[in-house]
DNA sequence: TGTACATCAGTGAACGCGCGTTCACTGATGTAC
DNA sequence: TGTACATCAGTGAACGCGCGTTCACTGATGTAC
């Protein structure tokens, strides 16, 4: 009788390690040539393996892409959550600034990964269904921070009927419980509205920077984003 | 002696028509499968032509992509300029609203074309050098509209030294003369700052919508963008 | 502790696909005298 | 108005490439008695 099935065993550990190496090589390719440059054969060659060996670790090209996307979402969500934990206790305004800076920092440090989750959907590739939940996890700390804020009246409620949305869209219920455990319906709606507003602004600025579309304009993206945080904080009446 | 070399002649006209048909077929493919799905052979087949015939009209795949991108930029810039001309005389605030709505309308009506110019840069494809100038042309009416506005102090000047930038970056000189013919340095800087601010916000909202990343959030993108226009107008102190 | 068996990582050859691009050519269309 | 020539759209065959994926297999590693 084995001591406990919980211990992975050397084989499983080695397996996980190889999976990680494959993903690392794949990311390196993405960084160089974009989504179109991701080729299983080239990855194998780079690892000193031969072609079909990769099929021991991933069901195929799409499966590998799935894993990369999930990792990227989880990683970004983790970074944002860490920042929220670190800055807990600060004023909402400076917390928002920290979260936004973390978001941008993550994106510009590894543009290919940001493009993977925030860029053009890959042709012929159907995103895994958990994608929506992952995206919401990234927004989680923002909603939590902004719950109960007072958005500029023009913004209105992003989701008119929160309860209807939560029952219609799977996963939303649990998400709300995680990030807004004790918020009133009004506070939750305000937080969601604020988070979407922040999201659109930050994604706009960051994705333009990451795609290199700023090249011709000549300005400092970090400073611009900081300024936009102030505008956002004003629009949401943050202290 | 021919009447005037200015008249294109039937051959040249037919040639232009075929070029247009090729581009239309290419756009149809982009709409279905994204950038990766653009294949010369398939385009040819769709037009009843056979493979190499396309090389009479385009030097290759990249040349065709160049043309599509230039067209998209020019088309969007034209739409925005038309909107500016139509709404001339309105208050800055409602003019901004019209321009932004036009921008979004163009993008959501043909998402593939918006992704072509605002999405992830295509792997292995080097954007033509005029791209920057085209992007600036789209922003032109916005700068013109916002020249002399009073941006929120936090925003600061997007370009600290406008004159240095204009001499460093080719094409900027002429661009400034076109859209800010008689503006003071301060008014020009304010207009540029405002335009960049508007650009980041609108691109953020529109690109999230066009990429389908809104699916899981459940809200009305057009209403959100309208609200954001009010916030922008406030941040730029528009009448 | 040793032996028999199951599991699984990895290989090499091969298939089929679609693509971009080149080449030598045919035939129609326009142009010059 | 008619003829000779140049221009140019379009063809068919072919090359080479890199890719995803399948298959039957070998050999090492772990496991059960």
Image: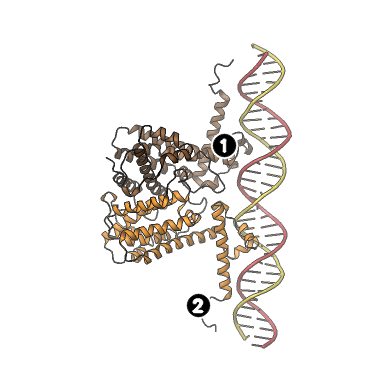
Chain colours: A orange, B brown, C red, D yellow
Q: Looking at the picture, tell me which residue is in the foreground, B168 or A170.
A: B168
Label number found at residue A100:
none
Residue B230 percent across, percent down from the top left: 29, 45
Left or right of residue B128, residue B84 in this image: left
Left or right of residue D27, residue A80 in this image: left
Q: Looking at the picture, tell me which residue is in the foreground, B128 or B60.
A: B128
Residue A216 percent across, percent down from the top left: 46, 43
Residue A224 percent across, percent down from the top left: 38, 50
Q: Looking at the picture, tell me which residue is in the foreground, C31 or A228.
A: A228
Task: Write down the quadrant of residue A135 in the picture.
Answer: bottom left
Q: Which one is closest to the eye, mark 2 or mark 1?
A: 2
Dot 2: within a 10 Å radius of its alpha carbon, few (fewer than 14), some, or many (20 or more) residues?
few
Residue A35 percent across, percent down from the top left: 54, 53
The quadrant the C terminus of chain A occupies is: bottom left
The quadrant the N terminus of chain A occupies is: bottom right
| Residue that label 1 marks | B47
Mark 1 residue element: loop
| Residue that label 2 marks | A6
Q: Is residue A11 visible?
A: yes
Give above or below for A218 relative to A162: above
């Amino acid at each position: 009788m084995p001591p406990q099935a919980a211990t992975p065993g050397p084989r499983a550990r080695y397996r996980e390690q190889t999976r990680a190496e494959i993903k690392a090589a794949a990311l390196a390719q993405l960084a160089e040539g974009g989504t179109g440059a991701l080729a299983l054969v080239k990855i194998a060659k780079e690892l000193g393996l031969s072609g079909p060996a990769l099929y021991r670790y991933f069901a195929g090209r799409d499966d590998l892409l799935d894993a990369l996307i999930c990792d990227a979402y989880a990683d970004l969500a983790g970074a944002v959550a860490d920042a929220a934990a670190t800055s807990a206790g600060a004023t909402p305004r400076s917390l928002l600034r920290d979260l936004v800076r973390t978001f941008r920092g993550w994106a510009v440090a590894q543009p290919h990964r940001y493009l993977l989750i925030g860029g053009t959907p890959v042709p012929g590739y159907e995103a895994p269904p958990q994608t929506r939940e992952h995206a919401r996890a990234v927004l989680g700390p923002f909603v939590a921070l902004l719950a109960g804020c007072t958005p500029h009246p023009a913004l209105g409620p992003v989701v008119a009927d929160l309860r209807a949305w939560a029952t219609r869209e799977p996963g939303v219920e649990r998400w709300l419980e995680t990030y807004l455990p004790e918020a009133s319906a009004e506070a939750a709606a305000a937080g969601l509205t604020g988070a979407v507003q922040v999201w659109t602004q930050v994604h706009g600025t960051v994705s333009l920077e990451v795609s290199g579309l700023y090249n011709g304009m000549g300005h400092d993206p970090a400073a611009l984003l900081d300024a936009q945080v102030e505008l956002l904080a004003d629009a949401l009446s943050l202290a």
